Image: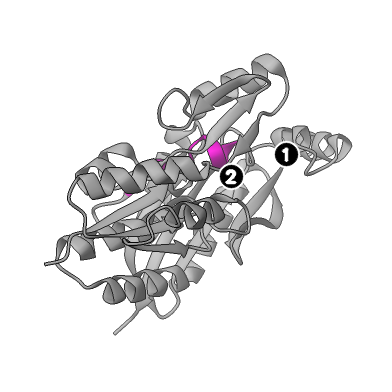
Amino acid sequence: MTNIAIITDTDSSLPPELAKKHAIIQVPITIHFGEETYTTGQDIDDSKLFTLIDQYNKLPTTSAPPPDAFVKAFQQAFDNGADSILCICVSSKISATYNAAVTARETFPDHDITVLDSLNLCMAQGFMVLAAAEAAENGAALDEIISLVDEIGKNVFVYAALPTLKYLAMGGRVGKLAAGFADTFNIKPILTSRDGKLELLEKVRTQKKAEQRLIELFRNSLQGKTINKMAMVHVNNAHGANNLLNQIRNEIPLPENIIMAEFTAGLSVHSGSGVIGFVVITTDAK
């Protein structure tokens, strides 16, 4: 049986324990506050990220892993006995990570390395990675795994609510006046993943209505479909994510094993603290 190693980046939002369980190597996104550099999953998490943002009163910059980081990850996989590698990267529409992995592949001209652009992010990407790892563990061939990953990417729904536009304003994505207006009138943006990017879907008034809207969007995503996998995602707001999960569970039958995941710093810096949402993978109802 071919030993296929699965590699990804930390924008997949995979909880470390899950990555470890399936021997998934995660190449980290880096965060820069001036001359200070932090590495996602090593010396910075969402909590520390926003402590530093509030301390400096400005957003950091983020950078994709350099090709050398992928070279090290590829070498690690081969040293651990891999015959081939499948590397699944965060959407190329929001990050240069995919290009870095493609460049790193050139260092191993005689090895079997496939690099995929997930065209997804957060646990949407994470579920693609998990499915690949589980299929590889079960002896699936590379082409079968790639087909499975592609199918999951086509059947994923991502929705989240932002409690404030403060951090989007700090990053220049919305005007400070508009952000202040939104916060004054308790306006909560709803985000979704569309065409490989996290985009504003709509705005609602109050956090309660935002949560109700998320539940409606969850129900709408299940029209004629069943739940395959599900994750709750958040930024510094596990309590809020659990509360939303309980509200959904009260209205919709859910699977037992639901992943609770942080966005992780490389994505959280672009959304802001307090975000809650869900990622659901569906299959056609029989």
Q: Is residue 226 visible?
A: no
- Residue 198 sits above or below residue 31 on the image: below
On the picture, is 38 further left or further right than 24?
right
Q: Amino acid at mark 2?
A: Lys
Picture coordinates of residue 78 (x, y %)? 25, 50
Q: Is residue 207 left or right of residue 56?
A: left
Q: Does dot 1 land on a helix, a strand or a loop? A: helix
Instruction: Work out whether 37 lies above or below 156.
Output: above
> Residue furthest toward the bottom?
286
Q: Residue 196 appears at what percent x and percent y?
A: 58, 62
Residue found at the far left of this picture = 1
Q: Name above or below for residue 154 compared with residue 87.
A: below
Q: Residues within 10 Å of mark 2 (few under 14, many from 20)?
A: few
Of the two numbered discs 2 and 1 in the rendering, the one whose residue sits closer to the viewer: 1
Mark seen at residue 168: 1
The image's mark for residue 208 is 2
Q: Is residue 263 magenta?
A: yes
Q: x, y (%) of residue 148? A: 33, 73
The magenta-colored residue range is 259-269
* Nearer-the-camera pick, 88 or 13: 88
Q: Secondary structure at mark 2?
A: helix
Are there few (<14), some (14-19), or many (20+) residues within 10 Å of tag 1? some
- Work out which quarter of the rendered image holds the N terminus and state it: bottom left
Cα distance between the residues tagged 2 and 1? 21 Å
